[in-house]
């Protein structure tokens, strides 16, 4: 029986929801007497991390930790996982990389809420069916002994799957059904035993990166094209697919051509001059802004989406800046559900130095200067002050629970780490869902704004809030407007009548002038990657901003 550990006692005493066990001191205790069995009695745990230890087995009692959302067991000596792991149906993030696992229990298929699964660097020769993993976005299974991709990985219901890394295995073929993966962005099948590729790979509409080096392909041209670019490879596969279908059915070739044309969206189409326009600038590899999401933040506030609004002009009317600030408040109340579902932050881009880091830090060590303040404080002190204010307000109103405007504070309750966004100078520029920071504060003279949306709910929630923010900003007229492309158009100046407190009758001409002089907003893509550089999300992508209220011009191939 393992002796009691102070880390476990601390979690019990302080009612923490996270436990991390790693380091030489932990290793010595595991070698001497095994893991403290009381770890598996901490039913309130949301995150359990046991990393870099000599641990060879995990107790069946792990099935008691039904509140776990993150299980990180990387770089141990595990040879198997118990069947009871199937009880952990709340799991979203699982890292079992760097162990000695040869198989995974069939009950693994019950983990239907998994979003990220890392089983890299094991001895796996088989894999459970993953067709039930409807939330799966990232699958890392490189450096194993797999002869096929996991069963069910091409199920059409896996609509969120964006990354498959399966290099350094023994995979001999890829299924043609891989075209079912409508959100697949990266496919790495390097150093396997592939002799051919399915032509249908070209029908994955979002696929941007295909890595096939180290395979003995019969068609050597495929390797050369892949070395040049994934786009060239996919175009060649598309041509081969058209020829194959044309040979079987003469009409199929035309159908494919039409489908591909449709897939390009409305790029190149001249927008209706009577409609508002959202102009999207492509992420530039050398200059584009990159946000790295660290592993620490995944168990705290894992979802983040960012983009840049360019060429803004708040001087077009006296109250335009104020209305933009009010807009954010309204969005926090409505689509963000009082910050419970998501939080919006805006930053003056010229005040930031990228790349940015989205991470999580211990509250006592988290130094920041909140918006509208002049002194640095810690996140621990700030949250305590806000809680005290909320409690005083509750007592004043004689309520039994916190008011709706303070409920977002509960999102941090019991968290050992707090989320934050840092610039390259290691300064915190936002602390969601609590506050922005003074360093990147926007003002009336701001021309370019980084928009940040974070959430604990889902990536789709982030995208929904971001689209609402961009659409409302477009209608507000803060971007470049007018037919001549100038920032000050007659349409935008006409807004001032309603801003200065005039009657509703005086506001009527505003709508008419906006119809004659449609608004334009320029949006630049921002890329979010994980700690190893793998893409998590780029926004706005081709499937985003599908809104009939405005036209979208995507300025890239």
Image (spheres, grey):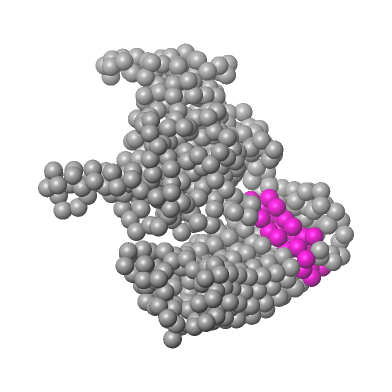
Q: Is residue 205 magenta?
A: yes
**Residue 53, picture quadrant:** bottom right
Observer-nearest of 359 and 312? 359
Whole-percent x, y for residue 258 in the image: 68, 46
Q: Residue at x 28, y 17 (%)?
A: 501
Expressed as whole percent of the image width and height from the top left, the position of residue 494 reads 41, 14
Which quadrant of the figure has residue 10? bottom left
Q: Against 549, is 25 above or below?
A: below
Please name whichever residue, 310 or 219, is drawn nearer the observer in this view of the structure: 310
Residue 406 image point, x, y percent: 27, 46
Quadrant position of the N terminus in the picture: bottom left
Residue 236 versus residue 288: which sits nearer the camera? 288
Q: Residue furthest left?
A: 398
Residue 353 in magenta stretch: no
208 vs 6: above or below: above
Residue 494 placement, left or right of 141: left
Percent position (x, y) of residue 325? 38, 29
Location of residue 430 with respect to 182 vertically, above or below: above
Q: Quadrant of the C terminus?
A: top right
Q: Quick check: can you spot residue 176?
A: yes
Q: Is residue 327 visible?
A: no
Tell me which corner region of the image, top left, top right, bottom left or bottom right, holds residue 237. Answer: bottom right
- Main SS, magenta region, reads loop
**Residue shown at the point (64%, 68%) measured from the top left:** 120
Q: Which residues are magenta?
A: 185-213
Q: Is residue 472 above or below residue 491?
A: below
């Amino acid at each position: 029986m393992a002796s009691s550990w102070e880390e476990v006692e601390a979690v019990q005493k302080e009612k923490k929801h996270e436990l991390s066990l790693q380091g030489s001191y932990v290793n010595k205790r595991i070698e001497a007497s095994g893991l403290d069995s009381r770890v598996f009695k901490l039913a309130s745990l949301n995150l359990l991390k046991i990393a870099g230890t000599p641990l060879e087995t995990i107790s069946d009692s792990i099935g008691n930790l039904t509140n776990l959302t993150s299980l990180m067991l990387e770089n141990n000596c595990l040879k198997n996982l118990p069947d009871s792991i199937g009880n952990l149906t709340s799991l979203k993030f699982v890292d079992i990389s760097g162990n000695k696992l040869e198989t995974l229990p069939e009950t693994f298929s019950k983990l239907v809420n998994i979003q990220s699964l890392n089983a890299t660097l094991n001895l796996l020769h088989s894999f459970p069916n993953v067709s039930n993993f409807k939330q799966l976005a990232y699958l890392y299974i490189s450096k194993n002994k797999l002869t096929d991709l996991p069963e069910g990985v091409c199920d059409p219901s896996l609509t969120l799957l964006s990354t498959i890394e399966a290099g350094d295995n023994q995979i001999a073929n890829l299924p043609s059904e891989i075209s079912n993966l409508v959100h697949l962005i990266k496919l790495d099948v390097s150093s396997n035993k592939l002799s051919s590729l399915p032509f249908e790979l070209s029908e994955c509409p979002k696929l941007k990166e295909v890595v096939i080096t180290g395979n003995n392909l019969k068609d050597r041209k495929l390797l050369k094209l892949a070395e040049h670019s994934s786009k060239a490879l996919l175009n060649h596969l598309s041509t081969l697919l058209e020829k194959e279908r044309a040979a079987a059915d003469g009409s199929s070739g035309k159908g494919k051509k039409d489908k591909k044309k449709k897939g390009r969206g409305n790029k190149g189409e001249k927008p209706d001059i009577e409609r508002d326009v959202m102009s999207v600038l492509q992420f530039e590899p050398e200059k584009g802004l990159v946000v790295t999401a660290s592993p620490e933040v995944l168990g705290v506030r894992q979802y983040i989406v960012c983009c840049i609004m360019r060429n803004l002009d708040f001087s077009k009317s006296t109250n335009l800046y104020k209305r933009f600030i009010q807009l954010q408040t309204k969005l926090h109340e409505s689509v963000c559900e009082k910050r419970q579902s998501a939080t919006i932050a805006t930053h003056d881009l010229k005040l930031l130095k990228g790349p940015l880091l989205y991470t999580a830090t211990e509250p006592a060590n988290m130094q920041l200067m909140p918006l509208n303040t002049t002194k640095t404080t810690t996140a621990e002190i700030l949250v305590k002050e806000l809680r005290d204010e909320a409690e005083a307000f509750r007592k004043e109103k004689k309520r039994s629970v916190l008011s709706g405007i303070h409920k977002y504070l509960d999102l941090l309750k019991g968290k050992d780490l707090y989320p934050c966004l840092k610039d390259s100078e290691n300064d915190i520029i936002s602390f969601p869902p609590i506050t922005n920071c003074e360093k990147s504060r926007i003002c009336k003279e701001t021309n370019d704004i980084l928009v940040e949306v974070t959430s604990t709910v889902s990536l789709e929630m982030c995208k929904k809030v971001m689209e609402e923010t961009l659409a409302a900003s477009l209608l507000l007229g803060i971007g470049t407007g007018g037919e001549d492309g100038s920032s000050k158009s007659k349409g935008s100046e006409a807004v001032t009548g309603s801003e200065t407190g005039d009657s509703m009758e005086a506001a009527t001409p505003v709508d008419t002038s906006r119809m004659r002089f449609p608004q334009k907003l320029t949006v630049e893509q921002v890329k979010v990657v994980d700690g190893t550089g793998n893409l998590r999300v780029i926004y706005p992508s081709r499937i985003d901003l599908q809104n009939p209220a405005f036209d979208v011009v995507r300025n890239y191939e």
